[in-house]
């Protein structure tokens, strides 16, 4: 059974930085795509950033230029470096790992809280 475990959330002042980590385990098939999504209170879950095993990335418009996603394929781990944080970045951040085809999976982590104070 595939597991996805996030770490690195916390409280930071506006303008500060945080780094989130997420590791996928439990399958012989590595994720094709790993990424971060977030959900603020009373809002829908939205894309933050995704990265493929080949290194292609896609970012949500609200984080472009401030957040950077990276990946260590050997460790099935993805990182999210968040700079110039704003109060509106406050949300629960969820990691997702997907593998397509044989042994396919689409697994979410339990989420990690990021709070940015003004």
Image (cartoon, grey):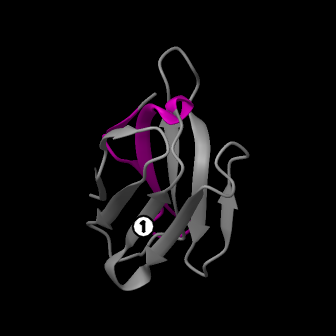
Which residue sits at x=50%, y=71%? 70
Q: Secondary structure at mark 1?
A: strand
Residue 56 appearing in the image = yes
Name the residue at the right extreme: 61
Which residue sits at x=29%, y=52%? 8
Which residue in the protein does label 1 denote? 78
Residue 5 spot, x, y in % from top left: 27, 54
Q: Which range of residues does the magenta coloring cover? A: 87-116
Residue 29 spot, x, y in % from top left: 40, 75
Which residue sits at x=50%, y=51%? 36
- What secondary structure is the stretch in magenta mostly built from? strand
Name the residue at the top extreme: 42
Residue 10 spot, x, y in % from top left: 29, 41
Is 21 inside the magenta-drawn segment? Answer: no
Q: Is residue 65 left or right of residue 69?
A: right
Q: Is residue 107 above or below residue 12?
A: below
């Amino acid at each position: 059974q595939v597991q996805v475990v996030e770490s690195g959330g916390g409280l930071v002042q506006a303008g500060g930085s945080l780094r989130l980590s997420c590791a996928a385990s439990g399958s012989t098939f590595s994720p094709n795509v790993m990424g971060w999504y977030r959900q603020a209170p009373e809002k829908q879950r939205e894309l933050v950033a995704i990265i493929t095993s080949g290194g292609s990335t896609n970012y949500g418009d609200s984080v472009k230029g401030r957040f950077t996603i990276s990946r260590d394929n050997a460790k099935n781990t993805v990182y999210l470096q968040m700079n110039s944080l704003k109060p509106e970045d406050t949300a629960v951040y969820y990691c997702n790992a997907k593998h397509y085809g044989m042994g396919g999976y689409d697994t979410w982590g339990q989420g990690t809280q990021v709070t940015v104070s003004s």
